[in-house]
Image (spheres, grey):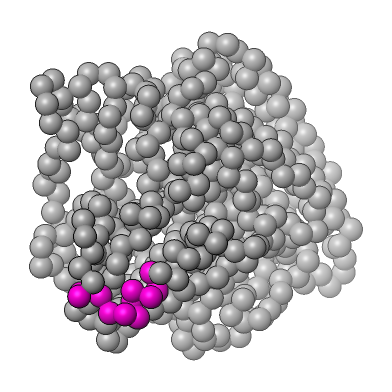
Amino acid sequence: MTVDRSAISPLVDAFAERVMARVEGGGRFCGLFGCAVANGTRLLAVLAVDGSLDTEVVLVPDGECFPSLSAQLPAAIWYEREIHDLFGLEPVGHPRLDPLVLPLPPGSARPRPGSGKPLDPVELDSSPLPSHLQGEGVFTISYGPVRSGVFESIEYLVETPGEDIPHLRTRLFYKHRGVEMRFEGMDVSDGVLLAERCEGVASVAHAIAYCGAIEEMAGVEIPPAAGLVRVVHAELERIANHLDSVIRHTEAAGQAVAYARLTLHKERVQRLRARLCGSRFGRGVVVPGGVAGPLRLDASQFFAALEEIEHGTRADLRLLMATPSFLDRLRGTGVVPPELARSYAAVGPVGRGSGQMEDVRFARPYAAYQRLGHHLLEGEGGGDALARQRVRIDEITGAFHLIRQAIDRLSEDTGAGQSWAVAVERVSGEALGWAEAPQGEVLYLVRVEDGRLVRVKPRSASFHNLALFHAAFSKDILTDFAFIEASFGLSIAGVAS
């Protein structure tokens, strides 16, 4: 599709050129976000460059468009679709502008997050999507939004001539809750409660990213002990999520004993998290300026519980990864070649399974990660489901190591009069916060006026990576679907929040 430059102002055109120049210069594309302003829509592109986050910003006036980046930058495809859904802003030249998170009939009012205006109830356009493939024997399987088992609501439209999957589309809006609009007008201290619920399985990571943006605005550093407590909860969350991915693989492969054993270990992790803070999901721990308080177990109690979990988990994972019938289902399944992962700027285990090695715990340290020894995992260049699973298992081992270090440091740092949080005054401004969730990099764009949230844009790793999901099926068949989905380890609530 040829871009109609007459619909795009020179300033907006220059914005797109600057973004592409940064990417071609080695920057990693992290996201493209919109914010409603009085006379248009403000676009902000976020790029990771040399261990820091940089931004490019432009105002697109009402009635104008912006040039799509997608032809040169596949990682931008879903961001542009989301912006079109929420703001009605057209990315001229986009290859396929299907509705993504909010399918509205033509002419409908858009939510326009950041406007501060309440939105009237909307009527969704849930009519079936037209077929993409044509030909004799080709048919479409509507897989979801309701499926057998405990799965989030998402509809996969599988177009197939029988076994191969030449084309796959996803419909996400069943999980859209309007979270971005719900942030508006909230007090900064209350916003963390909503951040924790954007993506329940990554509650701690979202809370850290949100609070990181607030702390950046306020110019405060959290107490050292609070940073260590954040690490403990974040790494327990990582272990639970990675075990869940392995559990789903064992279920799909019919590995009943491994399924039962690993489910037990995950449950023990969740119970330990509840003993530490009162929540199986680590909620209520992270607050702007630090944490709500110390761990509820002393070091000896904690290490005793952790030792039992770690010993059993590592032993059962070792047995599972030596089971040929299990490995055969993952090896060569759902291959994401390194060049494809690079073009989509894949993050987390999906990216690292294809050789994309950035981990923001160490590339842009936060909490107390800069104080803890760590090892960067070696890239798994294979890019298949097995490579992604090996990354997760290595990260489980690393998480246990980081937790032990954090508890040791915490025992040394904690004394009489220990502070767990610093005061955060009523702030104004805009900042970015981040964290490495189990699924990958979480970003928060937060704008505040006099202590009240004006615009909060959470960007989960699941949203960033799911855009790549369809490309993992090029050499696979229907029976591989469950393994590929489990290997991506995504949270649909985090995609369509």
Secondary structure mostly seen in magenta is helix
User: Relative to residue 396, is residue 453 drawn left or right?
Assistant: left
Q: Residue at x 37, y 47 (%)?
A: 467
Say how many tags the image has: 0
Residue 43 percent coordinates (x, y)? 37, 73
Q: Is residue 199 magenta?
A: no
Question: Looking at the image, is 149 positioned above or below residue 93?
Answer: above
Residue 303: percent from left, percent from top:
80, 41
- Residue 392 visible: no
Which stretch appears magenta?
A: 6-16
Q: Is residue 216 above or below residue 339?
A: below
Q: Is residue 356 rendered to the left or right of residue 472?
A: right
Report whether residue 387 is seen.
Answer: yes
Of the pair 366 and 250, the residue shown nearer to us:
366
- Name the spot of residue 353 as percent of width and height, x first: 56, 36
Rendered image quadrant of residue 246? top right
Measuring 29% from the left and 22% from the top, which residue is drawn there? 164
Q: 278 left or right of 420?
A: left
Counting from the top left corner in percent of width and height, residue 443 is at 51, 62
- In the picture shown, does residue 457 fall above or below 363? below
